[in-house]
Image: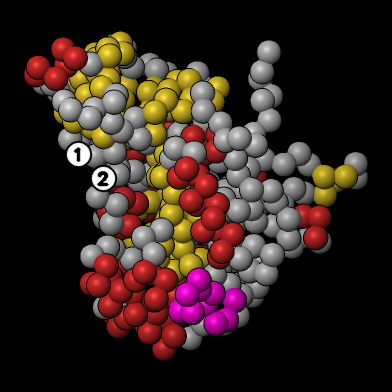
Amino acid sequence: MAGVTAVRLFAGGTIVELDGTRSADLLVVDGRIAAVGDVGQLGSVAERVDVSGLTIAPGLIDAHAHILGGGGGDGYASRIPELRLSDLTGNGITTVVGAPGIDMVSRNLQGLLAKARALRDDGMSAYLYVGGFGRPLASLTGSAWRDAWLLDDVVGVKLAVGDNRAPSIGARELVDVARELAWAERARGQALVIHVHLGTDPEGVALLRDVLGRLPNPNRLVITHCNWIRASLDAVVGLAADGANVDVSTLMDPAHGLADSVPPSIAVTDLLGAGVDPARVSMTTDGNGHVPARTTAGWDPYDTLMGTLFAQTRAIAVERGLGWPAALRVVTANPAAALGLARKGALAAGADADFLLLDESGALVGVYALGQEMARDGRPTVRDRYEVRKDAG
């Protein structure tokens, strides 16, 4: 036990796994899971935390969030602020991937990298995509493939198709990006994805259908915003059958002003019902990128919508009746596998100690990132240095 600084035994809980649930203890040593189930002699030296009656679930992975802030499409004053640590951890998100948005001028990749590293310094896991909406694809070192090869923070390239706000990308360029990432992946020994923003123009689906068979590894293609319109959701069923991963955005919901979108929990269950491989379906927020709507009095209050990831996961588990193991895999194991994050997405020995505590109703009552308690009963227990202490006193 030399060098150990923190040993905790979470005793009496119900563990959520891919194939079901089971009663088991969780032993955490220095931010990693040391054992699940029978902890043996190590349990005798641990600080004991009684979690009887609670469900222990893997921490959520949000593989598409605007951590640096989105917006800007309604004038300079519409540029959205950066996320704060508790916007993420307070909503059960223990791993995040920062995505470049439409504004590639005042929100550049250098700032996105710095923000991801700041979140890491504050206690959670954070990564980023390079690329974005501009042409040529934005990079930190002169090219996207060089970024992916040199920087562990980078987990892939984001680009946009089928959206009239983005410069057109052709089949040749998309295939070239995939080939460059495949080379960088072999050099780095780390999965690298092409994270595709799918707009509502049918040409986007047509382009993806055209290139999918020419990609070195179709499994490295993640198509997000599939539920923006029903036609996109229906179209990606065939793309998933050919090897792509499909991603539902929780921000895209009629409840949040997108009248033509498919509600996220329904979109996930519809994809599964259409025969899409359950391992190829994921869900992300696209959070902190929604400009408040104008009203006669000014603007609606701003909501980062980061809480939608857990809310929609719970809706899939409870309201749609799929249960917690099936619901959680779309926000834990599946994105972890797509991104090659071997220590994320499951509660197993050797994994990072990122987990959630849920009560009998499915409410989120505890959040741990890398073994550290980040939130309890809906209130953050760890904040970044610039967060306003709204609940102080």
Q: Residue at x 55, y 82 (%)?
A: 136
User: Does residue 277 show up?
Assistant: yes
Which range of residues does the magenta coloring cover? 134-143
- Reading the image, the residue beneath label 1 is 350
Residue contact between numbered discs 2 and 1, judged by CB atoms under 8 Å: yes
Q: Specify the amino acid type for callout 2.
A: Arg
Q: Specify the amino acid type for callout 1.
A: Gly
User: Does residue 240 show up?
Assistant: no
Q: Residue at x 55, y 52 (%)?
A: 115
Residue 232 spot, x, y in % from top left: 48, 64
Q: Is residue 367 above or below residue 220?
A: above
Q: Secondary structure at mark 2?
A: loop
Location of residue 45 (image quadrant):
top left
- Reading the image, the residue beneath label 2 is 343
Q: CA distance from mark 2 to mark 1?
A: 7 Å
Q: Earlier in the sequence, mark 2 or mark 1?
A: 2
Callout count: 2
Q: Is residue 218 above or below residue 167?
A: above
Location of residue 155 (image quadrant):
bottom left
